[in-house]
């Protein structure tokens, strides 16, 4: 049987910090997953196990795989959907991850074919506009309004629970401005 939890733990096994784990997930995807140019996105739905077994996917699959690996390690991470500013027909999905006390934009799909890696690009808020894309959806974060994460949990913050892929009882806790 295919055990993605075990695989995700193995991917992050040498990492000690959340930042190292997120970067291990990023590097593993870059080294092991290829963009599926033969995919017809109109008829495709994302299937995490299929992406892991075929080692192929489109941006949506790749972003969701990164989210799943991070969440399996209890690292707050979510996917962003949008379209290219110059061409609204060009749809795209990428990530935002919270590690080391900061929020980062991560676009592994672009990095699969880039000569210069996008890597982890520090941003100031969960809904900060992207330079190249118009954001149309921030998954799992519809309740957040102009907030930033704070690890100290002050009373002026509320908790947004994001389910990890391990089980429904395991959450990555996000603390967001009220």
Image (cartoon, grey):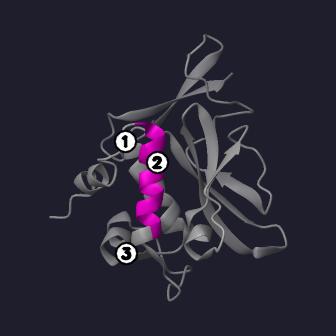
- Residue placed at 34% from the left, 49% from the top? 12
* Circle 3 or circle 2, nearest the eye: 2
Relative vertical location of residue 18 with respect to residue 176 in this rendering, above or below: below
> Dividing the picture into quarters, in which one does residue 128 lie?
top right
Q: Give the left or right position of residue 14, taking residue 137 as reference.
A: left
Could one spot residue 75 in this view of the protein?
no
As helix, strand or loop, the secondary structure at mark 1 comes to loop
Quadrant including the C terminus: top right
Please tell me whether mark 2 or mark 1 is closer to you in this view: 2
- Label disc, if present, on residue 73 of the rendered structure: 1
Which portion, as a residue range, is magenta? 17-30
Q: Residue, x 21% and y 58% (percent of image)?
A: 3
Find residue 22 and name its label: 2
Q: Distance between the residues labelled 3 and 2?
A: 19 Å
Q: Are marks 2 and 1 in contact (CB under 8 Å)?
A: yes
Residue 106 appears in the figure:
yes
Marks 3/1: CA–CA distance: 21 Å
> Are discs 3 and 2 less than 8 Å apart at CB?
no
- Residue drawn at x 64%, y 74% is 115
Q: Main secondary structure of the magenta part?
A: helix
What number is the disc on residue 144?
Answer: none
Question: Mark 1 or mark 2, which is nearer the start of the sequence?
Answer: 2
Q: In which quarter of the image is residue 2?
A: bottom left
Image coordinates of residue 16 in percent, x first then y, are 36, 38
Task: Check if residue 67 falls in the magenta segment.
Answer: no
Q: Based on the picture, tell me whether residue 20 belongs to the magenta stretch.
A: yes
Task: Say which of 50 and 151 sits in front.
Answer: 151
Question: Helix, strand or loop at disc 2?
Answer: helix
Residue on which the image places disc 3: 55
The CA span between labels 2 and 1 is: 9 Å
User: Which residue in the rendered view is the most extreme toward the bottom?
Assistant: 38
Query: Can you say whether 111 is above or below 23 in the image?
Result: below
């Amino acid at each position: 049987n295919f055990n993605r939890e075990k695989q995700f733990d193995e991917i992050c096994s040498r990492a000690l910090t959340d930042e190292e784990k997120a970067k291990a997930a990023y590097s593993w995807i870059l080294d092991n997953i290829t963009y599926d140019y033969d995919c017809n996105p109109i008829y495709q739905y994302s299937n995490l196990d299929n992406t892991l077994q075929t080692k192929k996917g489109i941006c949506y699959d790749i972003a969701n795989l990164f989210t799943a690996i991070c969440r399996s390690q209890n690292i707050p991470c979510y996917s962003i959907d949008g379209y290219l500013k110059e061409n609204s027909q060009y749809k795209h999905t990428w990530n935002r991850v919270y590690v080391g006390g900061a929020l980062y934009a991560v676009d592994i799909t672009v990095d699969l074919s880039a000569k210069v890696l996008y890597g982890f690009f520090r941003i100031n808020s969960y809904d900060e506009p992207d330079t190249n894309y118009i954001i149309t959806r921030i998954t799992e974060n519809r309740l957040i309004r102009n907030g930033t994460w704070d690890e100290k949990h002050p009373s002026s913050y509320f908790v947004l629970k994001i389910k990890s892929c391990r089980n429904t009882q395991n959450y990555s806790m996000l603390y967001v401005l009220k």
